[in-house]
Image (tube, rainbow, N blue to C red):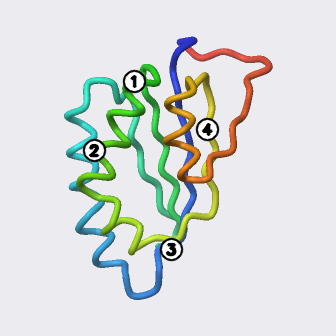
Amino acid sequence: MENEVHWMLEATIKDGEEENFRVVMPEMVEAALAEPGTTNYEWFLDDDGKTLHVYERYVDSAAVIDHVDSFHANFADRFLAIIEPTSFVCYGNPNDAARTVLDGFGAVYMNQIGGFAR
């Protein structure tokens, strides 16, 4: 667990992009499901259908880089045209290479100071 990296992306779905969101989201989930290093990939939408949270967890920094490379190659243009990111908070221990790719999303890094995961 010491090598795991996870994050929460919060975003707003842009006006008029709800249908495009509902098309691209399942494609992204299907692609992430095929990635062996992705352990969590969960999407949450509030009652008004505008505020989105995406929780992602990876076994290590190499899996993070693989996922982000796939995202850029297959979904970045479409997804980023649909949403407006409001926060990107990263947890865990990403290495320098993973931090470099996550910095492109404006990641804020949180250091664990206590607690546990089973």
Please name the residue shown 38% across and 42% down the image. Answer: 68
State which mark lies toward you, 1 or 4: 1
Please name the residue shown 32% across and 42% down the image. Answer: 69
- Amino acid on which the number 3 mark rests in the picture: Lys
Residues at marks 2 and 1, CA–CA distance in whole angstroms: 12 Å
Say which residue label 2 marks.
Answer: 70
Callout 2 environment at 10 Å: few (<14), some (14 to 19), or many (20+)? Answer: some
Please say if 106 is above or below 3: below
> Quadrant of residue 10 in the image?
bottom right
Q: Earlier in the sequence, mark 3 or mark 4?
A: 3
* Residue lying furthest bottom: 16
Using residue 86 as the reference point, say whether residue 50 is left or right of it.
left
Residues at marks 3 and 4, CA–CA distance in whole angstroms: 22 Å
Say which residue label 3 marks.
Answer: 50
Say which residue label 4 marks.
Answer: 90
**Contact between labelled residues 4 and 1, with CB atoms less than 8 Å apart:** no
Which element is circle 1 on?
helix
Q: Earlier in the sequence, mark 2 or mark 4?
A: 2
Q: Earlier in the sequence, mark 1 or mark 3?
A: 3
